[in-house]
Each structure stands twice: as structure tokens, then as C-alpha cells.
């Protein structure tokens, strides 16, 4: 399991989750973020996150 922040330098959490989903689909992703908008939640779930805090 990976605890992933959306706001990261170089490769943000959205890109990282999509990369992990493609290259390591067996890894579970839990997202931690201060962003509380629906678009961020939906985008992270589409990119493979199993949870969003």
C-alpha cells in the first residue's frame, strides 16, 4: 500500500497514481490531500486510488 499526496514536486499524485496503476496494478493507493473538490477525488479514483483522505 502506498500513501500518496496529490501535491508533489516533479510528478504530482495524479500522474504517479496513473503510472502505478499501469506498471504495478497490485499496489493499493490511498490518497492524502487537503484538496476537497469532487474533481480531484474522481480523478484519483479513476487513476487507481482505493481511498481518499
Image (spheres, rainbow, N blue to C red):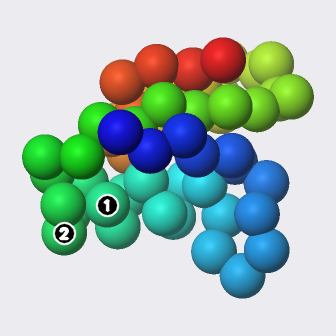
**Image point 48% across, 31% down: which residue?**
30
**Image point 77% across, 21% down: which residue?**
37
Residue sticking out furthest to the right:
34
Q: Mark on residue 45?
A: none
Q: Do tag 2 and tag 1 residues touch (Cβ < 8 Å)?
A: yes
Front-most of residues 33 and 36: 33
Q: How many marks?
A: 2
Residue 13 picture location, percent across and down: 60, 55
Whether residue 45 is visible here, answered yes or no, is yes
Residue 45 picture location, percent across and down: 41, 30
- Above-or-below relation of 40 to 15: above
**Image point 69% across, 48% down: which residue?**
6
**Kind of element beneath mark 1:** helix
Residue 20 picture location, percent across and down: 31, 60
Residue corresponding to mark 1: 20
Q: Residues within 10 Å of mark 1 (few under 14, many from 20)?
A: some
Alpha carbon of mark 2 to alpha carbon of mark 1: how far? 5 Å
Q: Mark on residue 23?
A: 2
Residue sticking out furthest to the left:
26
Left or right position of 3 against 1: right
**Image point 66% across, 17% down: which residue?**
53
- For the N terminus, which image quadrant? top left
- Above-or-below relation of 25 to 34: below
Front-most of residues 39 and 22: 22
- Above-or-below relation of 5 to 24: above
Amino acid at each position: 500500500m502506498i500513501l500518496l499526496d496529490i501535491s508533489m514536486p516533479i510528478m504530482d499524485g495524479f500522474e504517479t497514481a496513473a503510472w502505478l496503476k499501469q506498471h504495478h496494478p497490485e499496489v493499493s493507493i490511498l490518497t492524502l490531500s487537503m484538496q476537497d473538490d469532487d474533481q480531484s477525488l474522481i480523478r484519483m479514483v479513476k487513476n487507481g486510488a482505493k481511498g481518499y483522505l
